[in-house]
Image (cartoon, coloured by chain):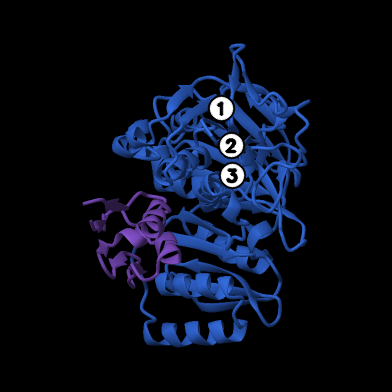
Amino acid sequence: MTAIVKADLGACQGYANCVVGASDYFDIDDDGVVVLLQTDVPDAELTRVDEAARSCPVSALKVIRG
Amino acid sequence: MTRIVIVGASVGGVKTAQGLRSGGFDGEIVVVEKEDVAHPYDKPPLSKAYLTSPDDLGAIRLIDQEDLAAIDASWRFGVAATGLDPAAKELLLEDGERLAYDALVIATGSRARTSPWGEGPGIHVLRTAADAHALRSALQPGRRLVIVGGGFIGAEVAATARKAGVDVTIVDPLPAPMSRVLNEDVGRIFLDKHAAEGVRTRFGTGVDGVERVGPELEVRLSDGERITADALLVGIGAVVNTEWLEGSGLVVDNGIVTDGRLRAIGAADVFVVGDVCRWQHEDGSGSTRLEHWTSAADQARLVAHNLLSPAEARAYVPVEYVWSDQYDWKIQVVGRTGSAESQLIGDPAHDRFAVVYSDGARVTGAVIVNWPRALIAARRAVADRGDADALVTMLTEIIAKAPAPVVS
């Protein structure tokens, strides 16, 4: 089963903790807003991507299990 | 392992609990928190927008209700831990209970250093939601606020209060805001910013005393100036909450001393996260304590892992990261800053710049204002101990292509 990562672009403050945690899933654009590089999270990646999402200081990211 | 007890429900404690559950822990989690609040809240907003927004703790929840429920912990708010018996593996609570644990995580944080000029009406510190509630009544247009201390808290409150129309003066014996962390030259960039935004700045000057004159406060500066104020904020640093561990046998030295994997020295099954943790680097380079949100969150994740997978326990090797919001500047600080060897890229007058700190050859840290691309590059360079000149060249090239002022 695949999980999906979602971003609240309005909440994002550009702290980039997510990029440090999983740079293959998250980037930050020139305005300091998160960019999702991919949204489907296979089981093997779940812990790492979930941890990266939870490192967001404003809870702008969420990994939703399918 | 059946019961893990966590002391402290701020970011370190809550993220540890969350990490334990997501890591598969199916035993009991008990979280003890001395503050009597309805749910865990986040502290960084307290010196920023929350200070002048409607008084609703729900707006600054640390995690949402759904995630909180998923942790499935017993939350004991309004109960202080008063002692620890590591041999018996019991936490002592103020109500007399001896709470047994299989593993304990200490996340008791720090508190604001108290005012040397007395307490009482109009004299504030800022650390907790209750402190913020007390201070917000002073932040009315036209009121006069004196802030003692130009560190991050003082500088943030100055910006927040100024935006609310408050007449603000910052006083600090240091030459510039945040200069202890950023160095004097870089601090002066922020000094100019505060002055340009209409804050009166009295740096290089201490406070000799504070007297009450009727309903007002008179702040006497060491250069002889007297400033009349309606309120005083004392932002002179934090003190770790470790007194309750007296007699426990834990090693306390401005923080609870742990090994590189954040396990308390001399106490099996006791881990430490957040402001209160002083960990020894595994490379033998000494010990460090950090007071950053991201450090607490990272340490929490590490401790959850080390509790669940002791055979694959990891050492804490951070790239320090802290942010600050002041006026329209989003300030981000990475790695170890403050060395005299720093190079400025970009123009503060255009509200976008970076400062790269080095030990000569290698990047040690950076300060970035309103520049997301530079933040990412700097975080990578610090983590990799990259070449300082290469980072400076790269950032200089980027900003040459996109020099336009940023509106945030």
Tell me where residue B287 appears, x and y as whole percent: 74, 54
Quadrant position of residue B222: top right
* Front tag of 3 and 1: 3
The nearer-to-camera label among 2 and 1 is: 2
Q: Is residue B199 left or right of residue B186?
A: left
- The shade of chain B is blue
Residue type at mark 3: give it: Gly
Residue ID at (46%, 42%)? B20
Give the position of the C terminus of chain B as an image quadrant: bottom left
The residue type indicated by label 2 comes to Val
Give the CA distance from mark 2 to mark 1.
37 Å
Q: Position of residue A29 (x, y in %)?
A: 32, 71
**Residue tagged 1:** B122
- Give the number of the disc on residue B274: 3
Q: CA distance from mark 3 to mark 1?
A: 30 Å
Q: Is residue B71 above or below residue B373?
A: above
Question: Looking at the picture, do discs 2 and 1 lie on one chain?
Answer: yes
Chain letter of mark 2 equals B
In the rendered structure, the answer to whether residue B139 lies left or right of residue B189 reads left
Amino acid type, mark 1: Gly
Both marks 3 and 2 on one chain: yes
The chain coloured purple in the image? A
Element assignment for label 2: strand
Residue under pointer 2: B105
Mark 3 falls on what kind of element?
A: helix
Disc with the residue nearer the chain's start (3 vs 1): 1
Which class describes the residues within 10 Å of circle 2: few (<14), some (14-19), or many (20+)? Answer: many
Query: Where does the N terminus of chain B fall, quadrant-wise?
Result: top right
Q: Earlier in the sequence, mark 2 or mark 1?
A: 2
Give the chain letter at badge 1.
Answer: B
